[in-house]
Amino acid sequence: MPASASVIRTKPLMLRHLPYFIASAVLVALAAGMQFDGYILNILMQATTFSIAVFGLTVVLGLCGQINLAQATFFGFGAYAVALGTADLHASYWLCLVAGCVAALIAGAFLGMSTLRLGGHYLAMVTISFQQIVTLVMINAIWLTHGPDGVSNIGRPQLFSNSQSYLAFCVAVAAIVGYIVWHLPDTKLGRAMRAVRDNELAAGVNGVDVFRTKVAAFGICAVLGGLAGGLFAGGFAYISPDQFAFSDSIVFLTMSLLGGVASPIGAAIGTALLILIPEWLRFLKSVPGLYLAIYGLFVILIIRFMPDGIWGFVATAFERWRAKTQAPSAEKALVLKPATVGGDIVLEVRDLSKHFGGLKAVDGVDIAVRRGGVHALIGPNGSGKTTTLNVLSGLYKATSGTILLDGTDITNMPPHRRTAAGLGRTFQNIRLFRSMTALENVEIGAERPGNRMVGQGGAAALTERAMEALTFVGLGHRANELITSFSYGHQRLIEIARALAGNPTLLLLDEPAAGLNSTEKLELHELLKRIAAQGLTILIIDHDMTLVSEAAQHITVLNFGRRIADGESLAVLRHPDVVSAYLGSE
Amino acid sequence: MDLVLQLLFTGIGIGAVYALVALGFVLIFRATNVVNFAQGEFSMVAAYLMVVFAVDLGWPYWLSFLIALAGMALLGVIFNLGVYYPLRHRSFLPVIIATIGASILLANSVLAIYGPQPQVLQGWFETPGIQLGSVYLDSQYLLIIAVTIALVIFNYWFFEHTLLGKKLQATSQDKEMASLLGISVSTMIMITFIYSAVLGGLAGILVAPVLFVSIQMGSTIALKAFAATIIGGFGDVAGAIIGGLALGVIETFGAAYISVPYKDGFAFLVLVAFLIFRPQGIFGERVAEKA
């Protein structure tokens, strides 16, 4: 069929987005040309610069699911760089603006790198602490920051010395940043961020470097904060520490939550509303605290009743409509061409152990998976099967032993590097990226580093590869639907498609038949046959003996963490130790 | 040497307050897997309740104290029903954000009612303190240390030797299994919130005579307490207490020998050092997500 997604994507980007650029140009022209009085001008200046800082939160919180409660600090970095640079050192505005962004980036990267390996609550607290420290420095380091008096006589570039033209410049910057953030979700980095947000474990085993993705998101957020702050300082010519306090970080957070944290459009809506509403309700400001108390209440209510914000609400409705209207399908059949570097053995596990304290979950296990076959790993409950699989895919660190994949030692690699080395896997309890469509899920799989089936990895090639994989499992016509609208059995197939799209050397299937009904099990069996027919090696773990005995040529049996039998299927299943492990001995 | 002993005493006193708030953090974290960012505001609200009853209305100190603690128990109930409970099935991020919202709401509501002027609350005892050799022991610090020791013992007894404590432990370790055994999980979580609100409130009332009663005291104490939990090992009760005491001592010495304006910054520096070199803390956090 000619009307495939790849055709839609190859239209020139500039042409498709022309309306956006025209609208932006009109806004810039209005900002430059209309005569505003000082009050309106200030509000517009504030809204424009704040929205850039809130775009940063869209990236880190909306796309990547990481919290940043110090955005006002990064905003302050940019603002102080421009303020002190132009007022005290008489340096060039542009130089100062860049310096501010760099300072914010360094601070953001440092915070991110020290904290992002840990759970989300660490990040929240560390960013709050950082915010408090920087506020202390802004107030107390008078020799540097002028202390509580603030900095005045902040310069602007020669070109935009008048307020109107400076506003137009800020609007132009906001439009460009907004455009970039708008399209970030469809780039490789943006998809990685969304994958991390939806399911960190699954992102890792699909080849996403989780830590680096989080640090990148945090860094981008900090830079946008710095940029916004630099523009802000130039716009108002005076800054003081109280503009960059913790409460301002909360204001930024509320703006992004209210408008919709996942999109820059939401960010702009939220920023505009929360700058305009307090202006209309000025009387609230006469009682100190009242206005922020209402913000706090807002945050609780939005999280409770409108978690996707105003724009998220609108966009979800649109997504559902779009999913029904489009259904591209693949032109070609999926081709699996597993790499063949090593010899006859694709996966060689030697003397593998995993101990949890005193518990030897896996104890000195050897497995050799032959190329091009279906190999099953079975054993009663608690025998160490899933632990073995988790050690193989890198979610657990092996206590001892070595794992060779296609001749490469992957024993000490993090999950995403194993995936790059050719490992694909599915999970017993399905781990799809739940906020994305089926197609987007599979695209992340297709993006596996080292996947030779997608050429240079361009958007069109990725989409095509993902469509082929979805069509292969029989779900091509529903590619644009959200994961949540698929049945359990179909979600399992999408997970397999996600692994297949990456063209792995070895496919690990963790209890693929669990929770499937008998028809679905038959379909799964068919699918496994079709995969094996293309020469892809499969290592399967399952309880379902019918599936295992029919699909696998070779079986390894574990019990109490040790290998009790290994060999050709039928022989193994008759082995007395295996029978007694499953049925008990007389 | 005298100065060192004096600072050590003060440090342990202030550290005991951090330890109490940290204990509240840890209890809620273990029961719900959520970090309550409004934990510090519990201390602040309780201190203001004391100001209202003991100072403004002039009621007896002990009566005001009981009313304030009862008020905290009520706040714990409202907090659970209004902030945590509706979000209990969502991921941790929305819950964290909601507790941050609650923290802003509580702090600024008090600001709106009471204004920004810090308030003064007298200590429990008439005697300001006793001179022991060259070290002056402030009576309020002595009280704080005594109450903390008593609470740690009570906490141990309660969780290890009472049925309710064991039910709470069971709930925090496996909610589904606990409910299958007939334990009402929502009641247990409610009790946890009440208990940690009261603990936080107690810390606030104890520390109020030492610091001023101000809007900022909540967030300041909470940050230190959180740092204490990380230093001790997240989710570990003993770790929270040791971490709190260590932080109090470090901060007091830092203020005396390095810089007073940056006193509140030392906690952060220690925190970052721990995050980089020993993120699991002294006693280690038990984290392992199953695939």
Image (cartoon, rainbow, N blue to C red):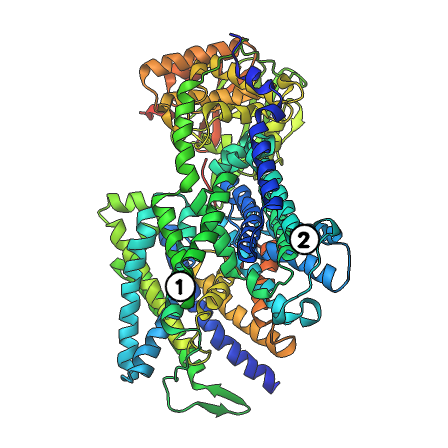
The residue located at (49%, 13%) in the rendering is A329
Vertical placement of residue B149 versus A155, above or below: below
Describe residue A331's horizontal placement relative to residue B41 as left or right.
Answer: right
- Quadrant where the C terminus of chain A lies? top left
The image shows residue A271 at horizontal and vertical percentages of: 49, 48
Which chain does the numbered disc 2 sit on? A
Name which quarter of the figure residue A126 lies in: bottom right
How far is disc 1 from disc 2 in space, using C-alphas? 32 Å
Element assignment for label 1? helix
Residue at 31% x, 48% y: name it: B86
Q: Amino acid at mark 1?
A: Phe
User: Relative to the observer, which residue lies in front, A484 or A559?
Assistant: A484
Q: Is residue B167 visible?
A: no
Observer-nearest residue: A101 or B242?
A: A101
The kind of secondary structure element at disc 2 is loop
Judged by depth in the image, the label closer to the viewer, 1 or 2, is 2
Q: Amino acid at mark 2?
A: Asn
Q: Which mark is residue A162?
A: 2
Q: Position of residue A528 (x, y in %)?
A: 46, 13
Residue A224 placement (x, y as % from top left): 61, 47
The residue where tag 1 is placed is: A283
Please say whether residue A194 is visible from this viewpoint. yes
Position of residue A457 in the picture relative to residue A203 (left or right): right
Residue at x-position 69% and y-position 57%: A82
Residue A197 drawn above or below residue A17 = below
